[in-house]
């Protein structure tokens, strides 16, 4: 088994395997990219997710989108309704998880990848606000989203990566 097959076998590839905060983040990103700014469904779901903190949450979400769009990398974002996740969407989930847990080292690693080493610290506070609001509403990110989605039987069957 080559390195690409190992990586894809150990990573989630289905939006249905995500908890609410993770699923919402991917869905909101996809919808914001694909739909006009005035999308009523997106606005309704943002109000539902952020509750009384909708203004602060929407501001943070907008800042995340603007900052990500100004990075050196072009992100690969799936279409709304598409069940498969892209590697960039998985990195986004991990980035928000790191922000929720104030893990600045892990955050910086994911931000460097997503932003192409550009303006990563402009992304921290909006991500922290976004994730914190969701967490206060009972919708937190898992501590290690990618590892949590791989069942123990899959881990046991996946051989260790060996360099040739």
Image (spheres, rainbow, N blue to C red):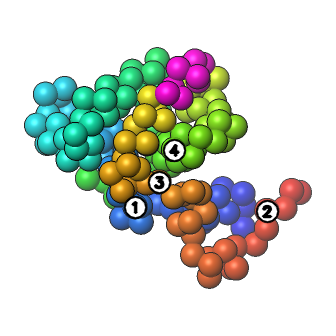
Mark sitting earlier along the chain (3/4):
4
Q: Secondary structure at mark 1?
A: loop
Q: Identify whether 47 is placed above or below 64.
A: below
Position of residue 40 measured from the top left corner of the image (x, y, whole percent): 10, 37
Is residue 56 toward the left or the right of residue 122 in the image? Answer: left
Choose top left, top right, bottom left or bottom right for residue 64. top left
The overriding secondary structure of the stretch rendered in magenta is: helix
Q: Identify whether 117 is placed above or below 92.
A: above
CB under 8 Å between discs 3 and 1: yes
Residue 30 highlighted magenta (yes or no): no
The tag on residue 161 is 2
Q: Secondary structure at mark 2?
A: loop
Q: Which residue is mark 3?
A: 141
**How much space separates mark 2 and mark 4, taking CA atoms?**
30 Å
Residue closest to the eye, 1 or 20: 20
Q: Which residue is mark 4?
A: 100
Q: Residues within 10 Å of mark 4 (few under 14, many from 20)?
A: many
The tag on residue 19 is 1
Magenta extent: 118-125
Evaluate whether residue 4 shows in this view. Answer: yes
């Amino acid at each position: 088994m080559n390195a690409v097959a190992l990586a894809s076998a150990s990573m989630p590839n289905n939006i249905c395997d995500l908890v609410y905060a993770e699923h919402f983040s991917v869905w909101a990103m996809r919808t914001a990219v694909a739909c006009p700014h005035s999308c009523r469904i997106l606005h309704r779901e943002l109000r539902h997710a952020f509750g009384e903190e909708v203004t602060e949450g929407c501001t943070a979400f907008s800042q995340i989108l603007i900052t990500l769009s100004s990075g050196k990398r072009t992100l690969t974002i799936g279409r709304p309704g598409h069940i498969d996740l892209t590697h960039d969407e998985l990195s986004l989930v991990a980035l928000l998880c790191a922000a929720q847990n104030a893990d600045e080292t892990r955050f910086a690693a994911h931000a460097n990848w997503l932003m192409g080493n550009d303006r990563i610290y402009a992304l921290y506070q909006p991500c922290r606000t976004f994730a914190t609001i969701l967490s206060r509403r009972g919708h937190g990110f898992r501590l290690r989203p990618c590892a949590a989605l791989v069942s123990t039987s899959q881990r046991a069957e996946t051989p260790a990566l060996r360099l040739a």
